[in-house]
Image (cartoon, helix red, strand yellow):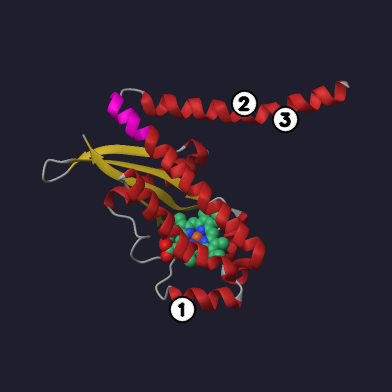
Amino acid sequence: MYIMLTNKHTHRTSPMKHALTLSALCLLGLSGVKAQDADMLSQSRSISQSMLKELGQKLQTAMADGGAVNAIGVCNTQAPDIAGRVSSQHQVKLSRVGTRARNPVMGVPNDWQAKALAQFEAALARGDKPADMEFSETVTQADGGKEFHFAKPIVLQPMCVACHGGTEQISPEVKAKLSELYPLDKAVNYQPGQLRGAVVLSRKAP
Ligand code: HEC
């Protein structure tokens, strides 16, 4: 009886930790910004998180069903599809960029996104946890309009090396398919824990 209770208690520590991380994030993000900015920030946060979650689930399912060769389609067509759908649904521009891009159009960071990636690299080198990192800024453009930018880091996990790892980790079938689809591919030779890129979102700001 006691053992069961103890077990239950142990399991409860993980959501608690998550809640603490979240509230730390909120404090960080909310200090000194206007209410409108806070709204845009929390919306960007949840849009980015749900895109990553949906993509991660689809990728995992496809990998389990037919391995990495099968899963390339998820990244190749579904990732841009999900980003496109969510973008028009929320009237934002959502995509993923890489520190070394595979997709030469969508995956290459613009100046602001490159700045965000540099901040994430520096934070990782300091030992900060990727889950606690995000970067956002409202930028005034040349025409006087304002644009809100948001970025959340994407760090390589062990399952990703089948398509983003070293030569010995990517099967010949996957290599062949990748070089057919992405002749300019730079997104290889990553190790788990390294910064792979970021989810990036931008939208008009009031
Ligand atoms: C089955 C192969 C495969 C696996 C596994 C895979 N990726 Fe990719 N990844 C791709 C492909 C293909 C693209 C290009 C997608 C496109 O055209 O937009 C890509 C693109 C990306 C991009 C966008 C930037 C760029 O380089 O174009 C990020 C970020 C990314 N992957 C992260 C990850 C992470 C993190 C994991 C592990 C959780 C992962 N990938 C697992 C195949 C894969």
Between the residue at mark 2 and the residue at mark 3, the CA separation in whole angstroms equals: 10 Å
Labels 1 and 2: the sequence-earlier one: 2
Question: Who comes first in sequence, dot 2 or dot 3?
Answer: 3
Q: Marks 1 and 2, Cα distance to the nearest angstrom? A: 46 Å
Please state the horizontal and vertical placement of residue 123, each as a whole percent of the image.
45, 40
Main secondary structure found in the magenta portion: helix
Per the image, the residue denoted by label 3 is 11
Q: Which mark is residue 155?
A: none
Give x and y (percent) for residue 201: 34, 46
Q: Secondary structure beneath disc 2?
A: helix
Q: Which residue carries the number 2 mark?
A: 16
Give the quadrant of residue 119: top left
- Separation (CA) of disc 1 from disc 3: 46 Å
Q: Residue at x 41, y 59 (%)?
A: 80
Left or right: residue 125 compared with residue 172: left
- Could you say where residue 166 lies in the image, as x and y percent from the top left? 57, 67
Residue 68 is a magenta residue: no
- The amino acid type found where label 3 is placed reads His
For the image, the number of numbered tags is: 3
Q: Name which residue lies at 15% across and 41% down.
A: 145
The magenta segment: 34-41
The residue under label 1 is: 180
In terms of sequence position, does the residue under pointer 1 or pointer 3 come before the other?
Answer: 3
- Give me the residue at 35% from left, 61% from top: 106
| Residue type of the residue flagged with mark 1 | Glu
| Residue positioned most to the right | 1
Q: Residues within 10 Å of mark 3 (few under 14, many from 20)?
A: few
